[in-house]
Image (spheres, coloured by chain):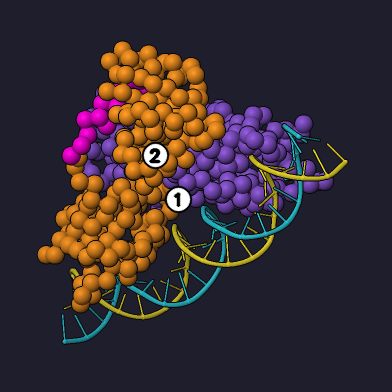
Chain colours: A purple, B orange, C cyan, D yellow
Amino acid sequence: MTILIVDDDLELLEQLSKALERKRYQIETADNGETALDKIFSVPYDLILLDIMLPRLDGLSVLREIRQAGLNIPVLMLTARSDVEDRVKGLDYGADDYLAKPFSMAELMARIRAMLRRDGNRDPVLRAGAISLDTRSRRVTQNGTPLDLTAKEFSILEFLLHNKGSAVSRFNMAEHVWGNEFDPFSMSNFVDVHIKNLRKKIKTPGDVPIIRTIRGIGFIIDDGI
Amino acid sequence: MTILIVDDDLELLEQLSKALERKRYQIETADNGETALDKIFSVPYDLILLDIMLPRLDGLSVLREIRQAGLNIPVLMLTARSDVEDRVKGLDYGADDYLAKPFSMAELMARIRAMLRRDGNRDPVLRAGAISLDTRSRRVTQNGTPLDLTAKEFSILEFLLHNKGSAVSRFNMAEHVWGNEFDPFSMSNFVDVHIKNLRKKIKTPGDVPIIRTIRGIGFIIDDGI
DNA sequence: ATATGTATATGACCATTCTCATTGTTGATG
DNA sequence: CATCAACAATGAGAATGGTCATATACATAT
């Protein structure tokens, strides 16, 4: 198992190399984007640890080049981000995972193990009736035709699908979808407004809304009956 | 020390009472907003644990009534929120703290102790030059005259003030201010745009910007020289 | 000093989000 | 069945957040 570590922090580079070598991985390093690409295109790696902030060529550009070249190597991005919960983000760009600095060695090891092990994963696609929502690419389709949803609409639909078959309250929904931004001390009817807009975008034959209202409770989504 | 617990979940009510009585607090309870208010206006409590979702009269209305009556009792709001970091929110409404359900008994105890101990706290007001920013009420003034900032502008200014005297990078700023929403994979110049708008709102004599640019690094705020 | 590339500033513009007032709907009650 | 109150849906508009193209400032080498 050969791992390429790309980071301009030489101290960190050293530290990571040592730790990973102790786990019997073959390690190579690069301290900038260009040499990273050179190496990647000449040697086959099993995994790449890629810092986002790099001299010469930043991590994102490196990643883009890798993917454009059709290489399917698992890439774990490293960022200075302190408090990431949903690594979903960025998966669009072809990164397989996303780890915030500073991270514990234990966590890094766990991720690396998981990524190397990973092949047939659970389905990242949520469905209900003719709707399917891909949590990775953040794309939604109805009978295959794509729906153009805004960020909030997507999150609301995702939340409803996660709770498919059971009603969720506006409050609960606001908590989950708005997260930190959610101010429990001021609730207008913004949830209803977004539901309305969602419904308008998800046209159904006979105008049977796929998102049903449970009076006094909230909203629910389920498969056809 | 007498504590009033207001919650309609009778099981939780029982549980809390038991736990707090064991800590030698005097406990009274109410399971709806109206009886809560009755009790509050007849007996002097040292602290109120107040659920937001209540029958008859919701927690927020209860809180409003308490404050309108000029009562200064510390109030700890309970909500179903799962992942709160900044309790700053809602302080406007006169709640002193804000705890998410489900919470651990340990955490609740810690908060209660802290609230009862608290009197002369650290200053929740950040300053630099003529600017002062109240993290509680989320109000900003320049020489006493209020500035009308948007949410993002406020957060950016708050972050700069928290790091007064040292430059912060755009990336770092984006991480902290945008939190979860922050997508390290797509950075436009939105930070610069907000900085520009902030500067426009913070007029200074001679147009000496209070937020200075550190070329190649980011931005900094400090007192006058 | 001048030129050149890079970093920053700004104006204009558009999509999204949210508030608000109004209207429609539902279910309980007499 | 009629009335009423609570709840939900909606349209319209305002504020916000963000993109982008362009202009400006700055650092460096010539």
At x 82%, y 46%, the residue is A206
* Residues at marks 1 and 2 touching, judged by CB atoms closer than 8 Å: no
Q: CA distance from mark 1 to mark 2?
A: 57 Å
Q: Residue at x 24, y 38 (%)?
A: A13
Between residue A156 and residue A97, name the one nearer to us.
A156
Q: Which residue is mark 2?
A: B66
Could you tell me which quadrant the N terminus of chain B lies in?
top left
How far from the left and from the top, in percent, is residue B216? 24, 61
Marks 1, 2: nearer the viewer:
2
Q: State the SS at label 1.
A: helix
Q: Residue at x 14, y 65 (%)?
A: B224
Place residue A223 in its image quadrant.
top right
Q: Secondary structure at mark 2?
A: helix
Question: Which residue is more in the foreground, D26 or B80?
Answer: B80
**Residue A51 visible within the image:** no
Which stretch did the figure color magenta?
B103-120
Which residue appears at 55% of the width and 33% of the height? B56
Name the image quarter holding residue B24: top left
Say which residue label 1 marks: A64
Host chain of mark 1: A
